[in-house]
Amino acid sequence: MAPLLVLSISFALLLLLGRLGVRHLASWVTCLRYALAAMFLLTASAHWGSRRAELVAMVPPALPSPELLVTITGVLEIAGAAALLMPRLAPWAAAGLTILLVAMFPANVHAARAGLTLGGSPVTPLVPRTLIQIVFLAATVAVAIGGRGSKRM
């Protein structure tokens, strides 16, 4: 739930700053890029912190090398977040992050079905988690498509 809060709150605050005259934040796409970058940096931080073991447990058993997969996905999230901050790379980064979100979703399904925990609390149940995933995908797709042109508020 924290990634959704970071995405939503940071996007709203950046939009507000844009409306208040911060010229760099006049584009909703720019605001969404920055909000997504913040969200992906947050999620990437879990790949090496105290929640790492829980993320490793979320990897479906059919996949090899769960620890390596968690490391790779964390690195990809950081790289994607950094690329979102660069206007020319942002659409490509958003497209790559869209693919990454789809590829990682089976881990969320596995975690929900297995009753795993994250941060000591049960993972978000499958239906709400699927809806949250749709929000994340909509945001990355919006940046991938909207980032190709200049969209003003």
Image: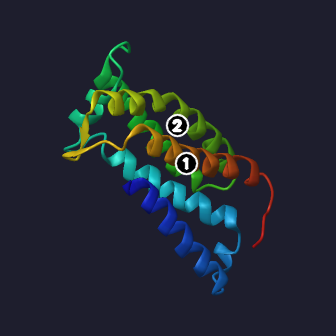
Q: Assign the C terminus to one quadrant of the image.
A: bottom right
The 10 Å Cα crowd at callout 2, few under 14, some 14 to 19, many 20 or more, is some
Q: Position of residue 70 (x, y in %)?
A: 34, 30
- Front residue (pair 127, 58): 127
Q: Position of residue 145 (x, y in %)?
A: 75, 48
Q: Amino acid at mark 2?
A: Leu
Q: Is residue 20 above or below residue 130?
A: below
Q: Position of residue 54 (x, y in %)?
A: 24, 35
Q: Which residue is mark 1?
A: 136
Helix, strand or loop at disc 1?
helix
The 10 Å Cα crowd at callout 1, few under 14, some 14 to 19, many 20 or more, is many
CA–CA distance between discs 2 and 1? 8 Å
| Quarter of the figure with residue 146 | bottom right
Q: For the residues labelled 2 and 1, say whether their Cβ atoms are less than 8 Å apart.
A: yes
What residue do we see at 47% from left, 32% from top?
Answer: 105
What residue do we see at 65% from left, 74% from top?
Answer: 24
Q: How many marks?
A: 2
Apparent side of residue 10 relative to residue 122 in the rendered image (left or right): right
- Front residue (pair 112, 63): 112
What residue do we see at 61% from left, 66% from top?
Answer: 31
Q: Amino acid at mark 1?
A: Phe
Q: Is residue 51 above or below residue 56?
A: below
Apparent side of residue 19 relative to residue 37 in the rendered image (left or right): right
Toward the right, the furthest residue is 149
Q: Which residue is mark 2?
A: 101
Q: Position of residue 5 (x, y in %)?
A: 43, 61
Helix, strand or loop at disc 2?
helix
Apparent side of residue 44 relative to residue 96 in the rendered image (left or right): left
